[in-house]
Image (spheres, rainbow, N blue to C red):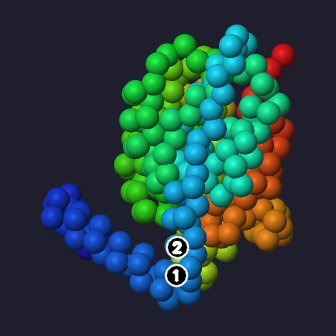
Amino acid sequence: MPHLPPLRRPSRSRHRRLALVMTAALGGALLVSACAPWRLSTSLDLAKQAQPYTAQPDQPTKRLLVVGDSTAMGTGASSPAESLAGLIGKDHPQWRIDNLAANGAKFGDVAQQLKGAEAGYDMVLVLAGGNDVIRLTTQKALRAHLEQTVALAREKGRAVVLMPCGNVGHAPFFAPPLSWAMSARSKRLHAMVQDVATASQVRYVSLLRPRDEDPFVTRSQELNAADGLHPSSAGYAQWYQELVAQGGLAALTP
């Protein structure tokens, strides 16, 4: 067997070059995959219009904190009431719902959201991960940010639920070959979230499905928003069904 030289840690400058190359590759892939410019413009418009759903009843019976990215804000829904948080509030009008989510947030940003939150919630619902997939967060950084997010969420709430988005590669926003890379990254994200959830004893709600079983593929026109990236109002209703079916609200309901 030939002698192999010892592995060297990449320098910071090499990390920067690698990041630039990956970003350039992503941009080029967007072009060659025929990602229409109007989708980008539509996605930005939807983000500008989105407002996080909150509810402040006089005598709340439960307190729910929602943190995360644009899917936690409800970007793509016709109104805040039709977002996932809004649908929870509709079925549970006596729950106080606070929402600290922000468009574009990665797990590292979600940790910052939680640092600014007060404690004493009955549950913390974390909706994030899509931006880490799309913006090429490394696996090492993603795990560190995810573990930090879970640790902080457990300090803020009695129960914690992790609900990352489904397979990003199935979104109409992306076309091959970029969609294939996004699918692979989505699967790695979900495997990591499930592993961290198990180790931390928090609940994981899975939206990951094979392409032929994914309702966002089989009912694409109905469940995807106009940008082909975010859920529509019907898409968030589908997510809400999964949240309930997988026991995501069990800690708050009799």
Out of 180 and 78, give the one closest to the viewer: 78
Q: Quadrant of the N terminus?
A: bottom left
**Labels 2 & 1 near each other (Cβ < 8 A):** yes
Q: x and y percent of residue 105 in the render?
A: 46, 49
Q: Secondary structure at mark 2?
A: helix
- Which residue does the image show at 78% across and 62% down from the upper left? 223
Q: Is 69 left, or right, of 25 in this rendering?
A: right
Q: Quadrant of the C terminus?
A: top right
- Which residue does the image show at 34% across and 78% down from the upper left? 24
Q: Which residue type carries mark 1?
A: Pro
Residues packed near mark 2 inside 10 Å, few (<14), some (14 to 19) or many (20 plus): some
On residue 40, which mark appears? 2
- Would you place residue 241 above or below residue 6 in this image? above
Residues packed near mark 1 inside 10 Å, few (<14), some (14 to 19) or many (20 plus): few
- Which residue does the image show at 45% across and 49% down from the upper left? 106
On residue 213, which mark appears? none
Q: x and y percent of residue 237 in the render?
A: 80, 48
What residue would you read off at disc 1? 37
The answer to whether residue 8 of the structure is visible from this angle is no
Q: Is 217 left, or right, of 152 in this rendering?
A: right
> What is the C-alpha distance between the residues marked 2 and 1?
5 Å
- Which residue does the image show at 45% across and 30% down from the upper left? 114
Q: x and y percent of residue 72 in the render?
A: 60, 44
Count of numbered circles in the view: 2
- Would you place residue 170 above or below residue 25 in this image? above
The answer to whether residue 68 of the structure is visible from this angle is yes
Out of 63 and 168, give the one closest to the viewer: 63
Q: Secondary structure at mark 1?
A: helix
Q: x and y percent of residue 156 in the render?
A: 51, 20
Q: Which residue type carries mark 2?
A: Leu
